[in-house]
Image (cartoon, coloured by chain):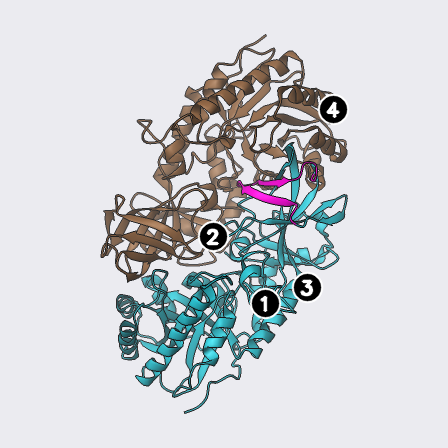
Chain colours: A brown, B cyan
Amino acid sequence: MTGPARSPRPHPGGALPAQRLAELDAEPVPARSLPASPATAAEARSAGWQLDDLWLPAVVLRDSALTHNLDRFARWCTEHGVELAPHGKTTMAPRLWSAQLAHGAWGLTAATVAQARVMRTCGVGRVLIANEVVEPAQLRWLADTLADPDFEPLCLVDSSDGLTVLERHLEPAERPLPVLLELGVAGRRTGVRGTAEALELAERIAGSPRLELAGIEGYEGALPQVRDGQAPEVARDWLARLTEFVVRADARGVFAANDEVLVTAGGSAYPDLVAGAFAAMPLLSRPVRFIVRSGCYLAHDDLLYERSSPLRSAADRDPLRPALSCFARVLSCPEPGRSLLGAGKRDVSFDIDLPVPRAMYREGVREPLDGRARIVELNDHHGFCDTEPGLLGVGDVVELGLSHPCTVFDKWQLIPVLDDADRVVDAVRTLF
Amino acid sequence: MTGPARSPRPHPGGALPAQRLAELDAEPVPARSLPASPATAAEARSAGWQLDDLWLPAVVLRDSALTHNLDRFARWCTEHGVELAPHGKTTMAPRLWSAQLAHGAWGLTAATVAQARVMRTCGVGRVLIANEVVEPAQLRWLADTLADPDFEPLCLVDSSDGLTVLERHLEPAERPLPVLLELGVAGRRTGVRGTAEALELAERIAGSPRLELAGIEGYEGALPQVRDGQAPEVARDWLARLTEFVVRADARGVFAANDEVLVTAGGSAYPDLVAGAFAAMPLLSRPVRFIVRSGCYLAHDDLLYERSSPLRSAADRDPLRPALSCFARVLSCPEPGRSLLGAGKRDVSFDIDLPVPRAMYREGVREPLDGRARIVELNDHHGFCDTEPGLLGVGDVVELGLSHPCTVFDKWQLIPVLDDADRVVDAVRTLF
């Protein structure tokens, strides 16, 4: 019996192949916020553009915040004895994935096989598809990848019916497909609900010639992600049940022989609760690899994760920094206290929170808004911004803090990256 | 004094240049629902794929519905004495724009200068930017286009401050920039509120050497778009005030000499009320061109516009047909009556309504759902679907009817087009 394997087994190959990244950087794509469109990432990097040159609305990334967050969260994972398979769905940006892998990530997480396909095309070597796969064509693709010694796919199983579909459509391959059994939250998303059912499913997977049980997965983010009241305690209890289940499954001998056991949970809100549950888990019959799958830590935000992350500014001396924001122009002030900004539902996320005005710029001078302006509604291309009368004027620029990075990234194919002097030093290409 | 000019002056050039469209069709783009990705539209057209080959989730367009809606709305416009500048923001799809222009559209509408820039690159010859433009770089671009005899841009002005910004940043050009004065809805979006203020602004525009007043614009879609209760009456009253204003402005002699007057309103919900208001407008001192700007009629939908369009199925014998839907796989049925579909907030619109399950497919057999399934929540990549226990099983496919096409199109770069035998006969490329 050996203790948990806490030494990193990083992503095979580390950063992504430079040539593939360079090819992506050379492809012209629609770039509605750049002075020229279509544009390439390479062009944005060398054109000498500034924030003032951008066509607003423009969602931008801050280089210093990205660099800080990459390092800060990598250190946090090391300090907490967990490894990171960052959720690549957040950004779908090969350059950012590469930076995460170069910072020691064990692999990437994907939500869908289509995302895993993009990742593989970009040279990602290990992808944990944190979802059930029951699509015949996608299972054929997965089986094909098993012949590729440079690619390691994993996916989830959460039901006997799902397992039957997998076995029916997974064609015989060079090696079994590694799967993790998913435990779920009652009343919420995917994942087995009961322990007895889960043990039975684990044994069926263990007995399948096409599959091997690589570990156990859960997503505590299906529970409310707030730091107030009972929510963290509820998540903690659920995570304790997850690790308890891992111990019971290990006792049944269901995990693939000759390999470590993967135990994974953790979005960007509760990785500390996850790490705590992992640390409290008893030793198993074989080495264990503890993996968190946070994706939003890299961009962080001004709202959702600034309320919920263990590295939010209210909870940590070296917090994550919001890297994304949106600059928008005041188009019209048709009534006292009502300004219309030129940014809307197609530019920024609105599924969790509306954007929050952080600062205004008039004739190039920045003034913090400190709660004096509020977005009350978004149309497709307009934001309704309420202030004291006269605060904003036509032609002013407002910088909006954002929530939920996942639904910001997917609205832009090329996102300019600014340095702290507001120069465009790069552009991040996304592949949605 | 001449009567309203009701003979069409269609888009210069009609359909878009075939070569530019072919170039776009030959560019590989991420295509997460296609069997190969990246893929080109040309490839999708010739590969011989079927619905069954698609990687779900897949948003698809129905060829027959598109063809029908193109023709049906063009006929409706002719019958109602209005011309069409369809809102290109809905699809941002050059192939669809081209079809709309080939069906007699007068030009395209854009919400932003960035969209107008894409349209011009694709060969669109006339773009009504139905928005205020106060961005210095964008005004420079607009001024530059005035030197292009093959491009006719128009934009809106709704305030004295906005006009000042325009005059400051519009560099001297070969000809004045044609603008429309925007009338607004109290408490809502952009647009001048009071008649006196609007007349004063019209006179300032008329006196500007850089601008000419081409007409009057309003957007009744800023009012509630429902057919129940007082809503249509409120919209009708507001539209009557708009045409009344046109008459008063004409009496002041503010419209550009030697040209027709443009009068435009009309999204996809109330074009009938708009056409009614236009028809009731007295003659002006010069010819009038009445333009509606509906964009969503082309895709129509199952919810928002199926409730509100004059061509909804409950109101017309030859109604618009919903052309967009999303096919998603049942990934898991973890509790009785709860199924998780593999489609979420990044695949379909959710800003007005959640999707509605129309039909299920099991082993290739289609069964209408007729209200027996309901989407109750969307996560990024999952849809929570509630049914009577046992109705759906893992591996079943659900076809989802959608709402608000604008926030569906912008989630996909390449949308497969199916014929009525579920063959992929084309793919529509979007340029967001």
Measured in 3D between alpha carbons, the distance from the residue under mark 4 to the one under mark 1, in whole angstroms, is 55 Å
Q: Does the magenta-highlighted stretch encompass residue B379? A: yes
Q: Residue at x 52, y 47 (%)?
A: A24
Per the rendered image, the range of residues in magenta is B371-392
Count of numbered marks: 4
Q: Which residue is mark 4?
A: A208
Measured in 3D between alpha carbons, the distance from the residue under mark 4 to the one under mark 2, in whole angstroms, is 47 Å
Whether residues under marks 4 and 1 lie with C-beta atoms below 8 angstroms apart, the answer is no
Disc nearer the start of the sequence (4/2): 2
Q: Secondary structure at mark 2?
A: loop
Looking at the image, which residue sits at the far bottom? B1
Same subunit, tags 4 and 3: no
User: Which chain letter matches label 2?
Assistant: A
* B246 shown above or below B118: below
Q: Residue at x 62, y 20 (%)?
A: A195
Q: Quadrant of the N terminus of chain A?
A: top right
Three-letter amino acid code of the residue under disc 4: Ser
Q: Which residue is mark 1?
A: B311
